[in-house]
């Protein structure tokens, strides 16, 4: 795993200030965004996808819902929505594993896990994450995930322990809770998050500014 992460060229988040806050991306990172607003995660995902495509990398979108966020980017969509052949967690995990061992994508954007939590239950949704996240790291696939506050404190803590990066982007702020392979000084710092259309900016808080 270490060799994969060192040899391949990492893809950035697509936003300079977010890269600065997170310390960029390392190939094989699973980045979990704690986010309660789908539009915020969609903006972050679009920036990541655009940067990856621009650098010649293959991007796969795992879709649990009908979302126009990535339709205009020309990236492959794997349909895992209700009624699809990959609607169940085992079938989806098996298909992703097959791709990792074949013509694997460089980057994956997984839709908000709120839908699978409702359909599968939180236990099966977590089991899917716990199986797939380490496999992505093993095969050098850089991935975005999204979980909501409603996932529950114990489940969120378990997700944090498994993933390489865990970033809180609730309440118009960005806070890096975990970022393996980066300086300790980058973790726990809060930024004010500003989103204008497709542009995402993380403003470092000034001395004396209160983080809500």
Image (spheres, grey):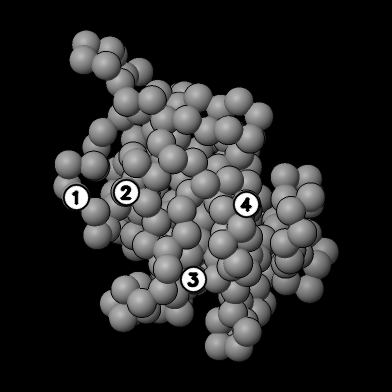
Real-space CA distance between mark 1 and mark 3, rounded to the nearest whole angstrom: 22 Å
The residue depicted at 65 percent of the width and 79 percent of the height is 95
In contact (CB < 8 Å): disc 2 and disc 4: no
**N-terminal of the two: label 3 or label 4?**
4
**N-terminal of the two: label 2 or label 3?**
2
Q: Please name whichever residue, 6 or 117, is drawn nearer the observer in this view of the structure.
A: 6
Real-space CA distance between mark 4 and mark 1, rounded to the nearest whole angstrom: 27 Å
Image location of residue 58, percent across then percent down = 62, 69
Q: Is residue 54 visible?
A: yes
- Return the residue found at the far left: 184
On residue 141, the disc is 3
- Image quadrant occupied by the C terminus: top left
In contact (CB < 8 Å): disc 1 and disc 2: yes
Q: Which residue does the numbered mark 2 point to in the structure image?
A: 23
Real-space CA distance between mark 3 and mark 4, rounded to the nearest whole angstrom: 16 Å
**N-terminal of the two: label 1 or label 3?**
3
Real-space CA distance between mark 1 and mark 2, rounded to the nearest whole angstrom: 8 Å
On residue 172, the disc is none
Real-space CA distance between mark 2 and mark 3, rounded to the nearest whole angstrom: 18 Å
Q: Please name whichever residue, 30 or 10, is drawn nearer the observer in this view of the structure.
A: 10
For label 4, the crowd category at 10 Å Cα-Cα, with few meaning under 14, some 14 to 19 and many 20 or more, is some
In contact (CB < 8 Å): disc 4 and disc 1: no
Image-based side of 153 in relation to 207, left or right = right
| Secondary element at tag 3 | loop
- Return the residue found at the far top: 208
In contact (CB < 8 Å): disc 2 and disc 3: no
Q: Which residue does the numbered mark 1 point to in the structure image?
A: 183
- Image quadrant occupied by the N terminus: bottom left
């Amino acid at each position: 795993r270490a060799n994969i992460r060192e040899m391949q060229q990492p893809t950035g988040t697509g936003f300079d200030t977010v890269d600065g806050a997170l310390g960029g991306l390392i190939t094989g990172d699973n980045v979990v965004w704690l986010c309660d607003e789908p539009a915020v995660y969609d903006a972050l995902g679009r920036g990541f996808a655009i940067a990856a495509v621009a650098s010649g990398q293959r991007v796969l979108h795992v879709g649990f819902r009908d979302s126009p966020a990535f339709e205009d980017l020309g990236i492959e969509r794997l349909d895992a929505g209700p009624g699809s052949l990959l609607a169940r967690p085992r079938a989806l995990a098996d298909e992703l594993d097959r791709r990792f061992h074949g013509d694997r994508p460089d980057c994956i954007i997984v839709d908000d896990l709120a839908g699978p939590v409702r359909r599968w239950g939180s236990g099966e949704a977590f089991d899917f994450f716990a199986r797939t996240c380490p496999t992505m790291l093993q095969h050098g696939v850089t991935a975005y995930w999204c979980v909501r506050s409603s996932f529950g404190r114990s489940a969120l803590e378990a997700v944090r322990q498994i993933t390489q990066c865990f970033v809180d982007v609730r309440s118009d702020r960005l806070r890096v809770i975990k970022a393996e392979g980066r300086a300790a000084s980058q973790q726990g710092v809060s930024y004010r998050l500003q989103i204008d259309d497709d542009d995402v900016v993380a403003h470092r808080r000034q001395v004396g500014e209160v983080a809500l």
